[in-house]
């Protein structure tokens, strides 16, 4: 059921890329904001209580609905999985955003590329050069392909029904929403997502290596990933950079100043051609996961 649910969700997304998912996510974020106003006293244990109140009821209701549908008819449970995956995954959104920036750079429209990068990924891009726009877009593409596609696929395959996919997405949303706070309220949300993402991040990095330059990806993962502040992001970016044969990280101009970041990857400097290569890597990785899940499905039937 896992393989066919994923295939169906991806086909539905290609056919109907509408804003349904955005409304659902905004509804959950509104609920999270209400919990924050009620629980936030700047104390970590209240952050734990708010995270629990945000995530656990949704998981309980989702699992209850799944098994209720399964008891009525397995086809209904499959349809429920497809709807959930359609609402929380975003492969088309990720690939389309990279294509837009790529087309703007190809046409020599740096201002449009900067605006798209700021609008789509929330990055301050007003001072970025062509190379920095390409580099940042590749980095965002690797991270977003993991968070919106591969991390969800991995968790969906590991836990029963839609439980894993929903847990991963909710944890990621709360980490982004509460993790930027300066007090201790959001500490648990960041740590919880880091723990949940530990295995998916490494499996995504390994799949990047298999779908790209295997030796360089493993070398960058082993030697460079630990230098990145976020260990899970560092592993994904280092492996992705090595798989693509491109240099990421390095200094970045933003808000009139220069920000120094660790160097990731080996090979050439980032440019517009590597944006297309990033989309190709994501497609190959998606096909790799679908083939693996199909083999597991066949093995399950044979068993």
Image (tube, rainbow, N blue to C red):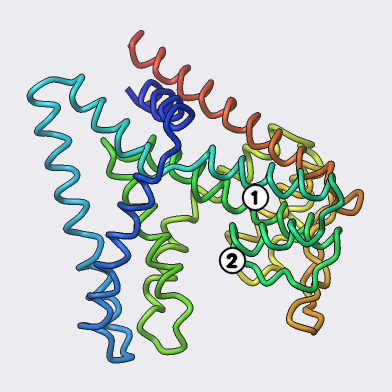
- Kindly identify which numbered label has been placed on residue 141: 1
Quadrant location of residue 250? bottom right
Secondary-structure class at tag 1: helix
Q: In the image, what residue occupies the spot 39% across and 86% down?
A: 184
- Relative to 188, is 73 on the left or the right? left
Looking at the image, residue 24 lies above or below residue 190: above
Q: Name the residue under label 2.
A: 122
Q: In the image, what residue occupies the spot 13% across and 29% down?
A: 69
Looking at the image, residue 193 lies above or below residue 303: below
Taking depth in this image into account, of 175 and 154 the one nearest to the observer is 175
The C terminus, quarter of image: top left
Where's residue 77, x and y in %?
20, 28
Looking at the image, residue 14 lies above or below residue 122: above
Taking depth in this image into account, of 66 and 9 the one nearest to the observer is 9
Nearest to viewer (mark 1 / mark 2): 2
Where's residue 285, x and y in %?
62, 33
Where's residue 291, x and y in %?
53, 21
Q: In the image, what residue occupies the spot 35% across and 16% down?
A: 300
Taking depth in this image into account, of 31 and 236 the one nearest to the observer is 31
The N terminus, quarter of image: top left
Secondary-structure class at tag 2: loop
């Amino acid at each position: 059921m896992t393989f066919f649910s994923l295939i169906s969700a991806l086909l539905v997304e290609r056919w109907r890329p509408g804003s349904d998912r955005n409304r659902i996510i905004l509804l959950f974020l509104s609920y999270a904001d209400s919990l924050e106003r009620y629980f936030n006293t700047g104390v970590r244990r209240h952050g734990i209580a708010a995270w629990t109140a945000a995530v656990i009821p949704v998981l309980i209701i989702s699992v209850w609905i799944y098994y209720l549908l399964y008891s009525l008819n397995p086809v209904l449970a499959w349809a429920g999985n497809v709807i959930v995956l359609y609402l929380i995954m975003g492969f088309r959104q990720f690939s389309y955003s990279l294509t837009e920036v790529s087309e703007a750079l190809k046409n020599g429209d740096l201002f449009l590329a900067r605006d798209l990068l700021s609008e789509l990924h929330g990055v301050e891009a007003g001072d970025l050069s062509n190379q920095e726009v390409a580099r940042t877009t590749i980095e965002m593409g690797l991270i977003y392909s993991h968070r919106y596609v591969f991390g969800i696929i991995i968790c969906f395959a590991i836990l029963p029904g839609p439980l894993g996919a929903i847990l991963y997405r909710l944890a990621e949303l709360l980490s982004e929403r509460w993790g930027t706070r300066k007090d201790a309220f959001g500490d648990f949300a960041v740590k919880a997502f880091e723990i949940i993402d530990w295995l998916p991040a490494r499996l995504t990095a390994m799949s990047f290596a298999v779908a790209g330059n295997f030796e360089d990806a493993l070398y960058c993962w082993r030697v460079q990933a630990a230098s990145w502040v976020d260990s899970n992001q560092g592993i994904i970016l280092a492996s992705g950079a090595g798989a693509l044969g491109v240099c990421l990280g390095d200094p970045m101009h933003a808000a009139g100043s220069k920000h120094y970041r660790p160097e990731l990857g080996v090979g050439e400097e980032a440019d517009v051609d590597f944006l297309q290569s990033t989309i190709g890597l994501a497609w190959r990785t998606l096909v790799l996961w679908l083939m693996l899940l199909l083999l597991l499905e066949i093995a399950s039937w044979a068993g």
